[in-house]
Amino acid sequence: MQSLSQLCYIFRLSLWSSVSAQEWQSEALQCVLQGDCRRLARLSLDYPDALLTHDNDGNSLLHFACRIGHLDIVCLLLEKSIEVGEQNHLGQTALHLAAICGFTEIVERLITSGSPIHLTDCSGANALHNASFSGHLEIVKRLVSASTQAKLDVGNKEGFTPLQLACGNHPSVAAYLIGIGADTSHQDERGNTALHLACYDGQIEVVSLLLRGKNAINILNKTQNSPLHLASFNGNSEIARLLISSGVSLR
């Protein structure tokens, strides 16, 4: 004689036997988008393969949960052994998305679950590039501490390092990266250093930080422009005066 729990399981199977795999996958995605962890957990009992759902761009449920910020769903998916380092069609892992969106707790959970930190997407960016670009200082610190060989000076396909990506709008991230030894003289594919970029964007706080170190202030980029040229082009007169007072060449 079958137990009540066995009868309930058989009933669920018969109830869902006519439901297509596509419908299961759609239901699973809706659970993630709506942040309904309990419903997703129940769904996974009846149709475990629903957790393997991907969209047309190669995004898994884990990608969606990390992009939206649903920590409980991330934990559920990781407990179900969903592949933590899977890449979508753009080469992004869930860690890439959590880092750029600023979800610190999710980043922590992904790292402790073995997410590859240095994996790059199709633009050559890793999670540290993404966090630096978005200005998420605590995530930047966590990514650096998680690696025994932090790759501070690796450029993406345009040659931008994490420091260079932070120079536009995120002085606190730039200050941290400079403080732990990021290369301030690195040149991107256009020959720009961090100082070029900070001068161009009018980031006087970052410029001041860079000038405190042994930054080569007269380096020319591939169009033969110095940081002073870029500051002047954009009307950043205060930065231009700071550069001149620091001994920049006026030629």
Image (cartoon, helix red, strand yellow):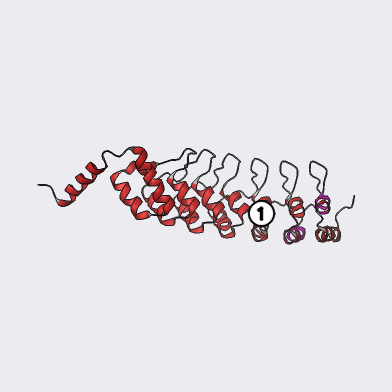
Q: Is residue 144 visible?
A: yes
What are the residue bounds of the magenta stretch? 207-231
Q: Is residue 210 magenta?
A: yes
Judged from the image, the secondary structure of the residue bearing numbered disc 1 is: helix
Q: Nearer the viewer, residue 176 or 101?
A: 101
Residue 142: x, y in percent? 54, 57
Residue found at x 48% / y 53%: 68
Q: Amino acid at mark 1?
A: Ala
Q: What residue sits 82% from the left and 55% below the top?
A: 235
Q: Which residue is mark 1?
A: 166
Whether residue 31 sits left or right of residue 146 in the image: it is left
Q: Is residue 12 left or right of residue 156?
A: left
Q: Check the image and report above or below for 76 versus 47.
A: below
Q: Measuring 42% from the left and 53% from the top, which residue is drawn there?
A: 34
Q: Nearer the viewer, residue 74 or 50?
A: 50
Q: Quick one: label 1, few (<14), some, or many (20+) residues within 10 Å?
A: many
Q: Position of residue 77 (x, y in %)?
A: 39, 49
Does the magenta run of residues contain 194?
A: no
